[in-house]
Image (cartoon, rainbow, N blue to C red):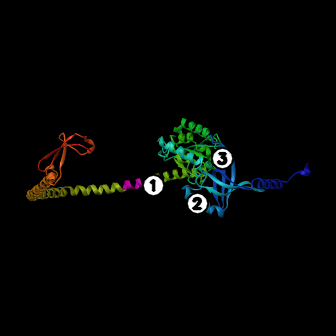
């Protein structure tokens, strides 16, 4: 048995040859991008995923590579055609070759992309959830809450074994200003299918004693982008955005942006950054209070001395100011009376002149309108005369009548019908013999 055993390298080489033999062509593949990274050399490294149609569970995953000579052409082409950045969370259709390396294993090398097959389930689901929350009028409720000035009582939702939770507590405890914080862990599962019910249960536990806490912090250590899918659910987002305490999230990397991040009060990159945010918030409050205290002490003494001097000066100036003000008001009233008198006289003269002008213009306009209407009536009289039957008869025309009605169609006549032809001078009686 040992004589036929293969080394791991030999086995992987055999797999590589088998894949190259059985799958030599390129294939169009539909998948979702859960991770997109490019390095200094211009190569792009991807993670393709596929989920259950009616759930959020991953059923397939593969590494992908776009070499720099393809990526520098493919990325701008895709973004120009779709208007969508080439980032994680979109669904794509790519042409790939299947590769297997003895050391790095199975991967897909991207050769081309179909830009018409763009946004994926993950990004679309996020947009749909955010749109639904906006339509319900709750999208920004948590963001509208104010973080208390002395935010020291911290309810933490995280995994008890997560390194991020330890980093968070250590950062708070060893802050350079000596501030005291009171964090308490409300355990939850931070990856996998149980994220949503677990975090919601922790929120319910905090809400039951919400008067004991100033803020809620939801933190999680690092991990693959696809592991954050549990934070992209409607129920969790709806609970967080309507939660009565401000929520600070530090659940992903800098490039990740979950629905929970979008609805929370404040989103930071890491658990350590969440602790730093709280420390800086308390430091800002302490500085403001210290500055206010110093300013109040200095301002009170300065203001007392200044007010004493000001009151003494005011008391001295009151009699003089009163006499001056009475004189000013007397002169002002006299000026107003004169201005009113001059104004009314000027306005009366102006209106009289205006009425005279209107009277003159009215006579001219009336005369012009009368002449115009007389001319129009003459034209109408001429048109009526030109259209009269007597005028037409005088020009050589005649009118044929049957039973007193004008005949305009010969087909309406029958042999034996008696006709009357009217001329300019007299009438002619006739009988139809033939048509």
| Residue topped by disc 2 | 77
Residue beneath the point at 42% across and 55% down = 295
Whole-percent x, y for residue 115 in the image? 59, 55
Badge 3 density bin: few <14, some 14–19, many ≥20, Cα 10 Å? some
* Label 2 to label 3: alpha-carbon separation: 24 Å
Judged from this view, the residue extending furthest toward the front is 433
Image quadrant of residue 396?
Answer: bottom left
| Residue topped by disc 1 | 291
Magenta range is 292-301
Image quadrant of residue 255?
Answer: bottom right
Residue beneath the point at 11% across and 50% down = 425
Badge 2 density bin: few <14, some 14–19, many ≥20, Cα 10 Å? some
Judged from this view, the residue extending furthest toward the top is 208
Among the two numbered marks 2 and 3 on one chain, the one whose residue lies closer to the N terminus: 3
Whole-percent x, y for residue 264 in the image? 53, 46
Whole-percent x, y for residue 317 in the image? 21, 57
| Residue topped by disc 3 | 50
């Amino acid at each position: 048995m040992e004589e036929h055993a293969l080394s791991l390298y030999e086995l992987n080489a055999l797999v590589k040859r088998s894949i190259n033999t059985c799958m030599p062509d390129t294939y169009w593949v539909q998948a979702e991008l859960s991770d997109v990274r490019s390095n200094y050399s211009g190569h792009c490294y991807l993670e393709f995923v596929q989920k259950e149609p009616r759930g959020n569970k991953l059923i397939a995953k593969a590494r992908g590579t776009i070499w720099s000579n393809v990526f520098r052409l493919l990325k701008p082409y895709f973004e120009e055609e779709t208007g969508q950045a080439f980032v994680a969370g979109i669904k794509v259709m790519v042409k790939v070759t299947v590769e297997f390396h003895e050391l790095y294993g199975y991967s897909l090398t991207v050769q081309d992309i179909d830009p018409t097959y763009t946004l994926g389930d993950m990004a679309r689901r996020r947009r749909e959830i955010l749109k639904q929350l906006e339509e319900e009028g709750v999208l920004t409720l948590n963001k509208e809450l104010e973080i208390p000035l002395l935010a020291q009582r911290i309810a933490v939702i995280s995994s008890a074994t997560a390194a991020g939770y330890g980093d968070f507590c250590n950062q708070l405890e060893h802050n350079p200003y000596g501030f005291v914080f009171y964090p308490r862990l409300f355990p939850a599962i931070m990856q996998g299918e149980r994220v949503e019910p677990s975090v919601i249960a922790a929120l319910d536990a905090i809400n039951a004693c919400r008067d004991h806490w100033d803020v809620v912090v939801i933190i999680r250590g690092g991990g693959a982008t696809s592991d954050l899918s549990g934070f992209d659910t409607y129920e969790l987002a709806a609970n967080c955005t309507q939660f009565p305490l401000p929520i600070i999230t530090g659940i992903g990397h800098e490039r990740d942006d979950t629905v929970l991040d979008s609805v929370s009060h404040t989103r930071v990159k890491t658990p350590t950054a969440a602790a730093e945010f709280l420390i800086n918030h308390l430091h800002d409050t302490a500085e403001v209070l210290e500055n206010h205290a110093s300013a109040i002490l200095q301002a009170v003494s300065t203001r007392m001395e200044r007010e004493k001097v000001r009151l003494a000066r005011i008391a001295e100036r009151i009699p003089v100011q009163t006499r001056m003000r009475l004189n000013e008001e007397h002169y002002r009233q006299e000026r107003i009376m004169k201005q009113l008198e001059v104004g009314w006289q000027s306005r009366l003269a102006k209106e009289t002149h205006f009425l005279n002008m209107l009277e003159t213009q009215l006579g001219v306009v009336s005369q012009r309108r009368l002449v115009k209407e007389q001319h129009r009536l003459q034209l109408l009289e001429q048109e009526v005369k030109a259209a009269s039957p007597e005028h037409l008869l005088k020009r050589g025309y005649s009118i044929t009548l049957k039973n007193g009605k004008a005949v305009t169609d010969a087909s309406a006549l029958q042999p034996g019908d008696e006709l009357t032809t009217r001329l300019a001078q007299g009438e002619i009686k006739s009988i139809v013999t033939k048509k």
